[in-house]
Amino acid sequence: MKQRRSVLSVFSLTLAVALGAALLGGLGGGTIEAGSDAEFTGAGRVVIRDASMVLTMDPSLGEGPLGALADADVVLEGTKIKQVGKDLDAGAAKVVDGRGKIVLPGFVDLHNHLWQSLIRGCAADKELVGWLGECVIPLYRAPVTDADAYAGTKLAAADVVSTGITTVTDWSHAFNADFAKGGLRALGESKLRFLYSYNGTTDPALQNEIRRVKREVIDPNPLARLQVGTHPSTGNFPSVEASEKLARELGVSLNVHLLESKADLTAGQMDALRRANALHPGLVANHVIQATDADLDELAAAGVSVAHNPLSNMRLASGVIRLPEMKKRAMKVGLGLDGGTNDTSDMFNVMRAAVGLQRAIATDPAVYPATTDVLRMATLGGAEALGMDKEIGSLTPGKRADLQLVDAQAVNFAPKVDWVNQLVFNTQPANVSWVFVDGRALKREGRVVGIDTARVVADAQAAADRIKKLLPQ
């Protein structure tokens, strides 16, 4: 009994000391170590202390094209990056231990279809037209719902966060208005920075709905932007023209799938864009694989941005993008996942594929892009393609606090040899330990924050089961 009382006394004293220290720390405004109950919600100040490497993507801040700094700190003030450098005085701040970690900007996913997490693995032996016919087109005349879009987008949003993505462009097929509402609701809850590409048509009711979405959903959310999506072709020209006019009216970008497969070569896609006066800066073109020199010259002269989706292009046997030729023309190119024809949200895998494809066809390891190039494409390059490089894409002080920490001590990553190359060739999503968007931690110490994973997966499975019944068997 005496021994038990002694143990209890020690426990009580330890608890009292701990509580007292916490109270004094709170009253004194001292630093709060990560791992306590402190939340990282984009308010107050956070310092990432003693990061083993910081890749700022801003050459003026560090060494080389990626602006690299060793053993440095990154200070976040609210939603923005305040300072980057060595031995910074962060004052009263929450502290994230950066030792053994690489800090870099969050990835910009330039092209995705988040709802397509519900059709992962669908028609894996088909090219683009066959895949669309089995997995997507039938849903335009099917009773897909708000709940379906919400479940698929919720799952995919958690997945992209896990791989270090902080900005996602969601090109939604918007099979009906309720379906679009479900996807937008999930995106809003995710706290990701996002662009929603709403598929436009000539339907006045749909155009009014897009106007309403911008006014009531997108504009009030500082993390959200609208785009108008369309599929250019001479056969679909009225919708292309109407979508371009609506995009101009709303002051947003047009987002198109362009020259993806050989079937697109007979669709008059470039002609449709010319006739609609859509070839101008701000246009985002996804894929652009089957492009001639003349096409590339025209797109480059017009200032059109390109989303490169190598894993999707490989899966669909669409071909290989002409990245070196785009580089020669100083075109803005970023990287994208492309939803259900990628099946994974792994941006590191996308970077590997972007490097490997060009080397394989050129049989030249020095061909563009190098590892430094794809890291830039996945971050600042994507931001430039979206016209958002003044806000995101680098760790330049004053920009939004969108960044990630990669654990360089994991068994698949260590030892340290050349961390820039290892980021591209070694990293897996599990190595991403922290992800911040607008200063809010969406992934913390290896776990996506605020997600009931079992519930999200169960809801997605139920939605996928419903969708499967609506597709050809």
Image (cartoon, helix red, strand yellow):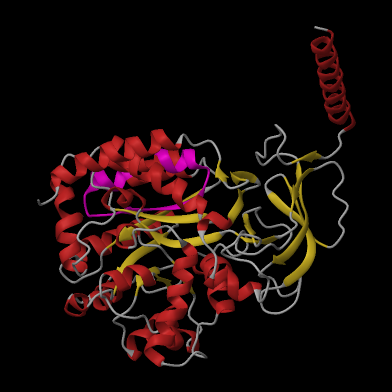
Locate residue 435, reporting x and y percent: 60, 51
Please count the marks in the image: 0
What residue sits 34% from the left and 46% below the top?
210
Which residue in the rendered view is the most extreme toward the top?
1
364 vs 35, left or right, is left
Query: Which residue range is magenta in the image?
Result: 185-209
In the image, residue 71 lies in the stretch drawn in magenta: no
What residue sits 53% from the left and 74% below the top?
374
Locate residue 457, reporting x and y percent: 37, 39
> Which quadrant is the N terminus positioned in?
top right
17 vs 135, left or right, is right
> Is 185 above or below relative to 68?
above
Locate residue 439, reporting x and y percent: 66, 47
Locate residue 344, reporting x and y percent: 38, 58
What is the quadrant of residue 101 in the picture?
bottom right
181 vs 68, left or right, is left
What residue sits 41% from the left and 92% below the top?
363
> Is 378 above or below relative to 153?
below
Question: Depth check: 115 or 358 in front?
Answer: 358
Could one spot residue 181 in this view of the protein?
no
Question: Depth check: 271 or 90 in front?
Answer: 90
Question: Depth check: 361 or 65 in front?
Answer: 361
> Is 208 above or below relative to 168?
above
What is the quadrant of residue 406 in the picture?
bottom right
In the image, residue 203 lies in the stretch drawn in magenta: yes
Could one spot residue 241 in this view of the protein?
yes
What residue sits 23% from the left and 47% below the top?
175
What is the quadrant of residue 184 in the picture?
top left
Question: Depth check: 111 or 295 in front?
Answer: 111
